Image (cartoon, rainbow, N blue to C red):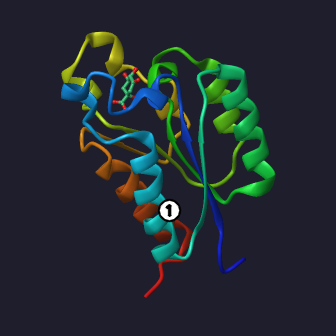
Amino acid sequence: MSTHPVVYVLNGPNLNLLGKRQPDIYGHETLADVEASCAAKAQALGLTMAFHQSNHEGEIVETIHRARDEAAAIVINPAAYTHTSVAIMDALLAFEGPIIEVHLSNVHRREEFRSHSWVSKAATGVICGLGSRGYILALDAVADLLGTEAG
Ligand code: DQA
């Protein structure tokens, strides 16, 4: 196994508006802030991170296909596609490494439709309700699951 496994951190629709979008629910940090925190954490854990955001379902599916060749693990906040996308679930089912699903908000405290996740059927684990800290915890979990934690 490489000493610096690659982890893809994928973000779904509207997350490009993080910080401006419903900050009472999603917080004031921007996606660039989240990316910077994730990059620092990944480096500390001895992981190489590739961070992506897309508003397009097919583009997310194709990024997951690329991960099959390029990544050892996936962290994904599929945003609204969580609740609708069998295509993203199927793409993730074709990925062999650990998959951590992250949501900034506690989806179970919100509207009923947010309680169902297609993506959870393909995920190794799910973190929700802890804001951007969820991404950091997901990277910790990835390092642990891959057995690469530094120090
Ligand atoms: C979200 C929760 C989803 O229900 C919602 O559609 C999002 C963001 C979250 O991070 O809390 O866009 O995934």
Which image quarter has ligand 1? Answer: top left
Of residues 131 and 128, the one drawn nearer to the viewer in this rendering? 131
Looking at the picture, how far across and down is residue 89, in whole percent?
A: 61, 28
Against 128, residue 98 (above or below) is below
Question: Which residue does the image show at 40% across and 59% down from the upper left?
Answer: 37
Give residue 93's quadrant in the image: top right
18 displayed left or right of 60:
left
Question: Which residue does the image show at 64% across and 20% down from the upper left?
Answer: 56
Give residue 26's quadrant in the image: top left
Question: Which residue does the image show at 53% across and 75% down from the upper left?
Answer: 147
Where does the C terminus fall, quadrant-wise? bottom left
Residue type highlighted by circle 1: Ala
Looking at the picture, how far across and down is residue 19, in whole percent?
A: 32, 33
Against 151, residue 69 (above or below) is above
Looking at the picture, how far across and down is residue 31, in whole percent?
A: 44, 41
Against 44, residue 72 (above or below) is above
